[in-house]
Image: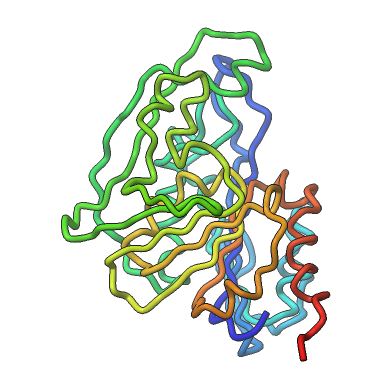
Amino acid sequence: MKRIVSLIALLALTAGLLCGCGAKNEENAVSVMSVSLITGTGAVGSVNSFAGKVVSGETAKLQKDESKKVLEVLVEEGDFVEAGDVLLAHAQEEIYYWTDHHWTSYGASLVYEATAGEMDLTPGDFQVYPVTEDFEGTLSSKSGSHAARDVIEIYVPREESLKYTVTFGEDTARVCSIYRRDALEQKDKYTVFFGGNHDRVEIRTTANTGKSLLLLKDSFANCFVQFLLPGYDRITLIDPRYYYGSLDSILSGGVTDVLFLYSADTFLTDTSLADVLRAGAQEEPTS
């Protein structure tokens, strides 16, 4: 994929939790993979597993369960760093919504703090604002139980000089926030982040870091982006489930980092990511 500095993948392993049904499942976990396309060795560190040097292709040491077979593919490309089961260490905290399958902004913030170093980012300082206490998500709808409500929080950078604009898809109109206030009046209040999923979103910031990020994602990334705003001059979000273009023009536009951020369920079962990655590879060179 041309000259990409690093490839990060966050797999959020979510359980089928029903709202109001006791403690949250402790199987929830996040594995963090960093793959360098330049060098060939790396270090593995985990809360409850093997830690030490590994060589590219040594996937046996990294294989923790069947759901993470994808590690075998990525580790062969180069460096591999596992930051550990970040969310598992906070299993008794509000890292997932009671009524929805997504992680909370707090859960996403824990992963951001744990992986900022691998992404060459300095963890930012954020002001936390609760924007609703009346969220009922997908688990509530599927179970038919309405015994619980969730709080949605947003994390806004304290750095007042940081400004940004957002464009969606082919629309040239710019907005100045990743948050949609009108979503709080709708049933799916999680769409307060970006108004939901889009094929392509472009964010331009005044961070002046010299860094540009390509983020390939599903809806789990929507609340994670707020933490990335201080770290990049440009962030391009691509949701392969809705995007049918090529990545070549994006990658040739000065991208320095590529981030894959998915729930494990989507990452392991959805084929649209492979379709998008193959689209660029199969294009015939122009004369």
Asked if residue 54 can be seen in this view, the reply is yes
Depth check: give the residue in front, 155 or 251: 251
Colour mode of the rendering? rainbow
Question: Is residue 176 left or right of 273 when viewed as pictured?
Answer: left
In the rendered image, residue 8, in percent from the top left (x then y), is placed at 57, 67
Question: Is residue 282 left or right of 133 when viewed as pictured?
Answer: right
What residue is at 37 percent from the left and 63 percent from the top?
204
What residue is at 44 percent from the left and 39 percent from the top?
193
In the rendered view, tell whether residue 83 sits above or below residue 138. below
In the rendered image, residue 79, in percent from the top left (x then y), is placed at 62, 80
Asked if residue 31 can be seen in this view, the reply is no
User: Quarter holding the C terminus?
Assistant: bottom right
In the rendered image, residue 62, in percent from the top left (x then y), is placed at 71, 67
- Image-quadrant location for residue 247: bottom right
User: Quarter holding the N terminus?
Assistant: bottom right
- Image-quadrant location for residue 180: top left
- Image-quadrant location for residue 245: bottom right
Q: Of all residues shown, which one is farthest toward the left?
A: 160
In the rendered image, residue 115, in percent from the top left (x then y), is placed at 46, 63
Image label count:
0
Question: Is residue 207 left or right of 144 when viewed as pictured?
Answer: left
What residue is at 34 percent from the left and 55 percent from the top?
165
